Image (cartoon, grey):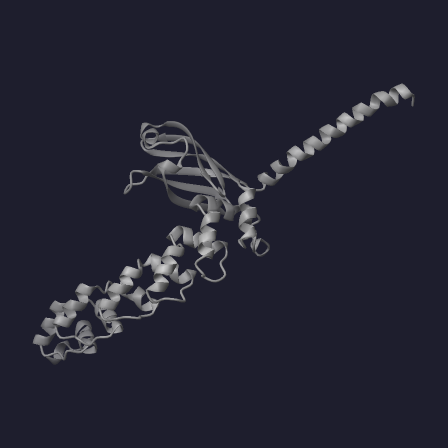
Amino acid sequence: MSMHVRTFLRPVFGLALLFTVAAVVAAWPAAAVAQNVLTGEWTASIDKEESDKLHLNLERRTDERGRSNMGTDFYFADLQGLSREQVLRGGAVKFSVVREAGSIDFEGSFRDGRGSGTFRFNGNPVFVSAMKGRGFDFDENSSTTSDRRHGENRLFAAAVINVTTAQADDLASADLGPLDVDDLFKAAIFKVDSRFAREMKASGFPDLGIEDLVKARIFKIDAEYVGEVARMGFAKEPMENLVKLRIFKVTPEFITETRNEGLTDVSLEDLVKLRIFKIDGEFIRRAKADGVPLEVEELVQRRIGVRRNKF
């Protein structure tokens, strides 16, 4: 090869190599991000109870056969590019939900307050890395599940319910023991944070874990309610008993009503039993008039008909 040819080819090869490297560098992050991309379809309607919210249903394919449906409410303030007026007016729309875990871009249309279309989720790899550094691995257990996109699906869920690194740091400060990604989801959904944890611990529950706190949120048990139960005469009751009180609606008014009829020394379990069998002050008065002994079991037997013919 002549000196002139070699001199000509050297910059050509150099330029080709430069373009090749540039192409690889440009493609690498795109490929990495593509792994965190999910698509699906959406439907929406204005929340019937809160007009400043839009209820969105997000449906997507999870594998070759399965489909996933997630429904949640978004404040219009969190929907970039969409207002309540646009929803009511109708027509084509494009809007986004931008969260730390990633962004969800929507495209479609509204008519008569209802909408539908498609969405595309782009996960944020920086968020994934930051959470992993805090001990929350979104790909954890991916090898033991049949869902090949386990990590992406969890990342998508984190964006929908707005799981953040600040939330992870806040929960870590509450001394709740080891936590995982699913615990972050529960805390975000039921609004469990370090403040709530500290309040519950100070109210007499020093060893509550995340599951107990979620249960407390579900049944609306907070420090104020714990104090209310104590004033009923049931201090230092375990969480399970407080849950029973909430489920069966054992209120201070109900306790006062039964005590006024003579049931002054009744356990919490007996109060729950009275509620289960719908035994109130009026029933107790009628039973007493018929000569039924003023005991919980006797009243229950009267309610179910066992003692009906004895008086």
Relative side of 22 to 106, left or right? right
Q: Quadrant of residue 243?
A: bottom left
Q: Nearer the viewer, residue 250 or 116?
A: 250
Can residue 248 be seen in this snapshot?
A: no
The quadrant where residue 88 appears: top left
Query: Looking at the image, which residue sits at the far left?
Result: 289
From this viewpoint, which residue is outermost toward the top? 4
Q: Name the residue at 14% across, 67% down.
A: 257
Residue at 35% from the left image edge and 60% from the top image edge: 199
Which quarter of the figure is the C terminus placed in?
A: bottom left
- Whole-percent x, y for residue 12 in the image: 79, 23
Q: Farthest residue toward the right? A: 2
Question: Which is nearer the eye, 307 or 89?
Answer: 89
- Residue 311 higher or lower than 239, as above or below: below
- The quadrant the N terminus occupies is top right
Q: Is residue 209 visible?
A: yes
The answer to whether 223 is drawn above or below residue 116 in the figure is below
Q: Nearer the viewer, residue 262 or 310?
A: 262
Residue 182 in the image: x percent, y percent? 47, 55
200 left or right of 28 in image:
left
Q: Quadrant of residue 232?
A: bottom left
Q: Residue at x 38, y 60 (%)?
A: 198
Q: Above or below — where is 253 with respect to 94?
A: below
Percent x, y of residue 189: 40, 51
At x 42%, y 54%, the residue is 186
> Residue 148: x, y in percent?
57, 49
Q: Number of labelled discs? A: 0
